[in-house]
Image (spheres, grey):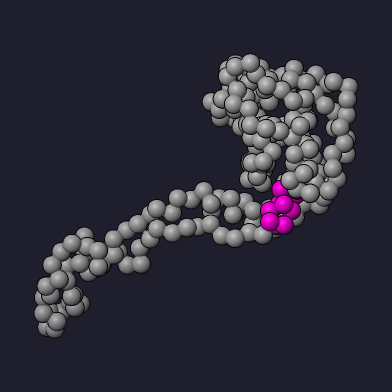
Amino acid sequence: MELAVYNIKGEDTGRKISLDDSIFGIEPNEHAVYLDVKHYLAAQRQGTHKSKERNEIKGSTKKIKKQKGTGSARAGSIKSPLFVGGGRIFGPRPRDYDFKLNKKVKKLARKSALSAKAKEQLLWVIEDFSFEKPRTKSFVELLKNFNLQDKKSLFVLAEPDANVVLSGRNLKNAKVSHADSLNTYDVLRYENLILSEGSLEQIKSILN
C-alpha cells in the first residue's frame, strides 16, 4: 500500500511512501485486539480498593443477646456483617489486575489495529516536524491544516519531542505519542492516526 506524504501545512509533497503489508495490510484479528485492549485497561487499574471485614472492625466481641428464645436470628457480636457498622462480607481487597499476555499476541493486536486504520483510510503520513517552543496555537493550526480540529486524532512521532507533546497536551481531541509507546488501545480510541515518516521505520523494527 502506498500513501501520499504531507507536510505540516497539510500540503501534498508529491512523494509517496510504501507501507509494510505485514503490518498495515493484514486481516485484523479481533480476538487478539480484544485481549490486548483488556490487558492495557487492566494494567491501568490502581487496585487500591479496600473495605474492612469483620476481624478489622473495632467493637466489642461480647455476645449481644442470648442464643435462643428471642425469636430472631442468633448474633455473635456487634461486628456482625448483618448490623449497621459491621464488617463487610467478602469485601474488595488490594490486588493487581494485570495479567500475562504473550508478546506475539500483543504484536498481532497492534498490527490488526494499524491494518484496520489503513483499510478505513484513516491513516495519514506527514514529514517529521517539531515546534520551536511549546505552543498550543501551533498544534491547533496543524489540526486545522488537516481538517481534524473536531476529530479525535493520534499523532505518532519517531522520538519523544517535548515541544510537540506540550503543545498538544491541553487539547482533548488530540494526543501525541511516539513509536515505542504505541498501543492498540490508543490506535482504536482515536479516529484518525497521523504517523511521521520517521515513526514508520521505528514501528517496522518493533513489530517485525
Q: Position of residue 39 (x, y in %)?
A: 59, 54
Residue 138, picture quadrant: top right
Q: Position of residue 202 (x, y in %)?
A: 75, 39
Q: Is residue 22 above or below residue 80?
A: above
The residue located at (78%, 38%) in the rendering is 201
Q: Which residues are magenta?
A: 103-112
User: Total of numbered circles in the picture?
Assistant: 0
The residue located at (88%, 29%) in the rendering is 16
Q: Is residue 189 left or right of residue 202?
A: left
Q: Position of residue 128 (x, y in %)?
A: 74, 25
Q: Is residue 185 visible?
A: yes
The residue located at (75%, 41%) in the rendering is 203
Q: Is residue 105 magenta?
A: yes
Q: Is residue 106 above or below residue 146?
A: below
Judged by its main secondary structure, the magenta piece is helix
Residue nearest the observer in this picture, 93 or 83: 93
